[in-house]
Amino acid sequence: MVSAALGYRYVYDSTERQYAHASGIAVVSARGRIGRVMYGVSFPARDLHDALDRARHEDPPRAVAAAEFAPAWLLCFHYDPQTGRYTFAVMNAVRVAALLALAGLCLAIVRMVRNERRARS
């Protein structure tokens, strides 16, 4: 199984009907060898270019400690499978963004109404 070869773990949450898993990419050579696994949601261009170049030329992967990438390991959607909920920080960020969007919409409406009243007078 590909996920086992990558050391990729995931958990199915039946209440949410989705899989909780780390995010990342695996660069695989034309011969099917795993050249490099990069965790996270953004990848530095230099690292990605290096991984693709090594895979193209079948160079052995660089030895990189897993601890180096530990801070970048994120669960998909920041979902915590142990509690069965989205993380507190993420939900608060979504709430703040929604409130800011609502405030911006209200401000835009007030400005449009004022501009319309000024144009009529």
Image (spheres, helix red, strand yellow):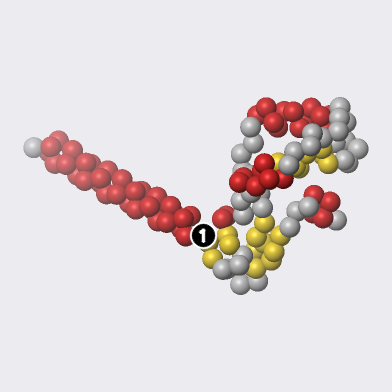
Q: For the N terminus, which image quadrant?
A: bottom right
**Of helix, strand and loop, which one carries label 1?**
loop
Toward the viewer: 21 or 67?
67
| Residue at x 36% of width, y 48% of height | 101
Q: Is residue 101 visible in this depiction of the protein?
A: yes
Residue 69: x percent and y percent?
A: 66, 43
| Residue at x 46% of width, y 55% of height | 89
In the picture of the structure, the residue carrying the numbered disc 1 is 87
| Residue at x 71% of width, y 41% of height | 38
Q: How many marks?
A: 1
Q: Amino acid at mark 1?
A: Thr
Toward the viewer: 113 or 20?
20
Q: Farthest residue toward the right?
A: 31
Q: For the C terminus, which image quadrant?
A: top left
Residue 40: x percent and y percent?
A: 63, 44
| Residue at x 72% of width, y 45% of height | 66
